[in-house]
Image: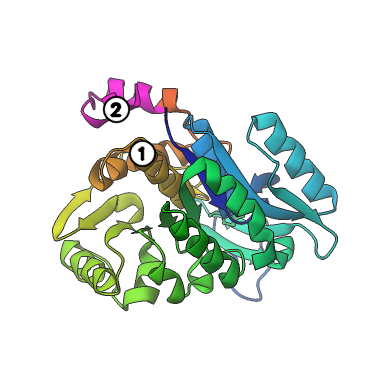
Amino acid sequence: MSKKITVVGSINADVVATTGKYPIRGETKFGKTVNTFPGGKGANQATACHRLGKETFLVGVVGDDMFGSQILSDIQKSGLDTKYIKMTKEASTGVAMIMIDETAENTMLVIKGANDTMKPEDLRQVEQAMKESEILLLQMEVPEDVVIQAMIKAKSMNKLTVLDPAPADGITFRALNYCDVIIPNKQETKFLTGVDVHNTESARRAARHLDDLGVKNIILKMGDKGCFVYKEGREEVIPAIKVDPVDTVGAGDSFSAAVACALADGVDLFQAAEFAVIVSGLAVTQIGAQSGLPTLDDVLEYAKEHDIHHYLLNYQ
Ligand code: RIB
């Protein structure tokens, strides 16, 4: 039976505006559309795991307000387990103000709100969820102490910890001591290693630096260039799949979730990354961090159409 996954992380309402070009600081511009979508790195990753067929627990907090109730009801409808999601009166639901320009690139301001009220005491839920799961997947949009304590708990239970150290604004070096797998994007890699990844040589330097810092399974996300995978001196560049991107919000989340799912199925880091580039590639073809997340059937169909058979056989 496939292993279960616990995701500890943020739950947000994403207010997404599309525009031709971003306004410059101090300027007023007319945009094109505005919509509210469910988001938050934790919720995006948990939803991605769920769509990919994994039994998934999401541990997080929403505010006791309109966004919180709406998000909880949406999550329930999606079939994802909500028993470890808390509603608090301490703060309002996290909100991300997002602008997407004509190149599908995004700029984001995140108000952490209720996500920031999560405390290490809330980790009793993580312990419960981890009793049933083999993999703990986390990001850095909830307090650092929560992330660290959750990983310590998971390690004491001999579980695998997968860290997506996003956003760069929330990164902590302490977290590196407890993660088995790290999946940073270019900004986060720069923050952690000082290396600006722009080619294979710089990716190798950054990965070796992370390896020296003690993390032994490394995947550097390189956006439309794909990813660089590094483990014990073996390395591989895996190109992104070719798609017409509409919205890249949550692409990194879907990538990390896919890696966790593949690892839960027992494939190695390189095969997991091959799976993840398809998942994140398909995820950017629709607007909304969660609306475009592919199901396992979507991924298999893509693989069949493009004659990619080898590792996906593990999922059938
Ligand atoms: O990674 C994308 C997510 O970051 C968005 O859904 C937004 O809520 C922020 O958490």
Amino acid type, label 1:
Ala
Picture disc at residue 89: none
Q: Nearer the viewer, residue 256 or 103?
A: 256
Q: Is residue 14 left or right of residue 246?
A: right
* Image position, residue 193 (x, y; %): 32, 76
Q: Which one is in front, 284 or 77?
A: 77
Residue nearest the observer in this picture, 26 or 9: 9
Badge 2 vs badge 1, beta-carbon distance below 8 Å = yes
Q: Quadrant of ligand 1?
A: bottom right
Report the residue marked by disc 2: 314
Instruction: Report the span colored magenta.
Output: 299-316
- Dominant secondary structure (helix, strand or loop) of the stretch shown in magenta: helix
Q: Is residue 119 visible?
A: no
The secondary structure type at the circle numbered 1 is helix
Nearer to us in this view, 268 or 223: 268
Q: Which color scheme does this rendered protein use? A: rainbow
- Report how far apart the C-alphas of labels 2 and 1 lie in the structure: 9 Å
**Does residue 94 show up?**
yes
Q: For residue 69, what is the image quadrant? A: top right
Q: Which residue matches tag 1?
A: 262
Residue at 61% of width from left, 48% of height from top?
128
Residue 10 magenta: no
Mark 2, residues whose alpha carbon is within 10 Å: few (<14), some, or many (≥20)? few
Answer above or below: position of 131 versus 28: above
Place of residue 153 in the rendered image (x, y in percent of width and height, measured from the top left): 52, 60
Extreme-bottom residue of the structure: 194
Q: Amino acid at mark 2?
A: Asn
Residue 272 in the figure: left or right of residue 154: left
